[in-house]
């Protein structure tokens, strides 16, 4: 990718449902001079998502969409994304499965972070499942989103050792620290930086 002389950054939207700790690390990354992205929009399906506060702190506009009707919610999200000329979507703990139609519209432009070493442990309860299966390692994966759950092309992964007596909560905490480092690295990799 040819670097333009001006610091033109890729306009990015982050989708969240909860605490937004990955959102926070992405915002901190986006502010750096050599970051390829600029976060222009935070989208949530949860009015009480704690992560929405980062929008206020960093002055990034945010929108909350009611998902009672997924089709209507996605239509509104798509129009919001087009209005803001968003070129990259980062899912960060967004607890909704995007429709095939939505994914097709933004093919190759949606990234997700998942708390396991994909293709193992797609979906939910990843930490407990890894522990219950006596895995020695778990970790996190940043991947492109396709129409199958947690099945898109893997960009980067980070391994985390599962210790004796590890609980789902302690493993989640360890993996989250790595997620915060991995997501920015994966974005840089996507843009060949």
Image: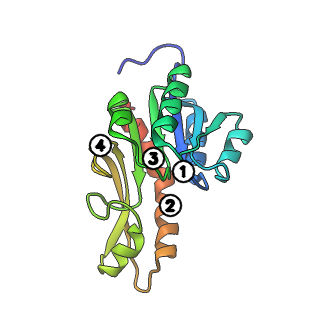
Q: Would residue 35 be found to the left or right of residue 158 on screen?
A: right
Front residue of this view, candidates 156 and 83: 83
Q: Position of residue 151 (x, y in %)?
A: 27, 50
Q: What element carries label 3?
A: helix
Residue occupying the point 46% across, 35% down? 89
Which residue corresponds to mark 2? Answer: 176
Per the image, label 4 sits on a secondary structure element best described as loop
Residue under circle 4?
Answer: 147
Q: Mark 3 points at which residue?
A: 183
- Closer mark to the observer between disc 3 and disc 4: 4
- Decide: marks 3, 4 in contact (CB < 8 A)? no
Which residue is identified by label 1?
22
Q: Most extreme residue toward the bottom, as rendered?
A: 165
Number of numbered callouts drawn: 4
Q: Quadrant of the N terminus?
A: top left
Labels 2 and 4: the sequence-earlier one:
4
Label number found at residue 94: none
Asked whether the residues under the numbered discs 2 and 1 touch, taking CB atoms below 8 Å apart as contact, a structural biologist would say yes
6 sits left or right of 61 in the view:
left
Quarter of the rendering occupied by the C terminus: top left
| Residue 104, quarter of picture | top left
In the image, what residue occupies the spot 61% across and 34% down?
Answer: 31
């Amino acid at each position: 990718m040819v670097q333009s002389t001006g610091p033109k950054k890729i306009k990015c939207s982050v989708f969240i449902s909860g605490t937004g700790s990955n959102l926070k690390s992405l915002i901190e990354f986006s502010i750096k001079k050599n970051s390829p992205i600029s976060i222009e929009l935070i989208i949530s399906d949860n009015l009480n998502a704690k992560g929405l506060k980062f929008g206020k702190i960093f002055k990034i506009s945010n929108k909350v969409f009611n998902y009672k009707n997924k089709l209507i919610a996605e239509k509104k999200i798509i129009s919001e994304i087009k209005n803001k000329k968003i070129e990259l979507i980062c899912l960060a703990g967004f607890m909704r499965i995007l429709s095939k139609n939505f994914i097709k519209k933004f093919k190759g432009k949606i990234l997700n972070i998942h708390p396991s070493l994909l293709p193992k442990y797609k979906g939910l309860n990843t930490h407990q499942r890894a522990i219950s299966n006596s895995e020695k390692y778990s970790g996190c994966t940043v991947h492109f989103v396709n129409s199958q759950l947690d099945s898109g092309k893997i960009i980067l992964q980070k391994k985390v050792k599962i210790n004796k007596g590890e609980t789902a909560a302690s493993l989640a905490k360890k993996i989250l620290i790595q997620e915060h480092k991995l997501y920015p690295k994966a974005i840089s990799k996507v843009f060949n930086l």
